Image (cartoon, rainbow, N blue to C red):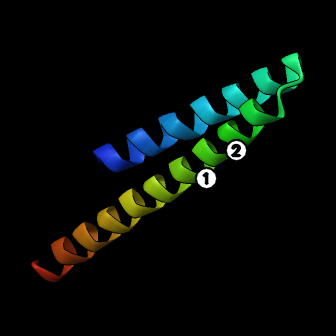
Amino acid sequence: MNKDQVKGELKDIGGKIQEEAGKAVGSSKQQAEGLGKQVEGKLQKGLGDAKEAIKDLGNRQGK
């Protein structure tokens, strides 16, 4: 795993927690911000996944 994958996963989890907290207190603003963090986290994790795939491809071609 690379740092983008880890940070992305943490943002996604944090966003889920924030969304649920918003639901619990009836704050649509907190829910929306939580959803936004989830999207940001998923995108960052996807970037990390792509970096890993490129690295793996390079390692295979280098052999």
Residue 17 quadrant? top right
Residue 29 image offset from top left, x and y in percent: 75, 35
* Extreme-bottom residue of the structure: 61
Residue at figure coordinates x 10%, y 79% from the top left: 62
Inspect the image, locate mark 1, and give the three-letter code of the amino acid beneath it: Val
Image quadrant where one finds the C terminus: bottom left
Residue 47 image offset from top left, x and y in percent: 40, 62
For numbered disc 2, what is the local secondary structure?
helix
Number of callouts: 2
Q: Is residue 35 above or below residue 16?
A: below
For numbered disc 1, what is the local secondary structure?
helix
- Confirm whether residue 1 shows in the render: no
* Extreme-left residue of the structure: 62
Residue 60 quadrant? bottom left
Q: Is residue 35 left or right of residue 37?
A: right
- Looking at the image, which is closer to me, 30 or 10? 30
**Mark 2 burial class by Cα count in 10 Å: few <14, some 14-19, many 20+:** many
Residue 41 image offset from top left, x and y in percent: 52, 47
Q: Is residue 2 left or right of residue 42?
A: left
**Mark 1 burial class by Cα count in 10 Å: few <14, some 14-19, many 20+:** some
Q: Is residue 63 left or right of residue 44?
A: left
Q: Which residue is mark 1?
A: 39
- Determine whether label 2 and label 1 are within 8 Å by CB: yes
Q: Is residue 49 above or below residue 11?
A: below
Residue at figure coordinates x 29%, y 47% from the top left: 2
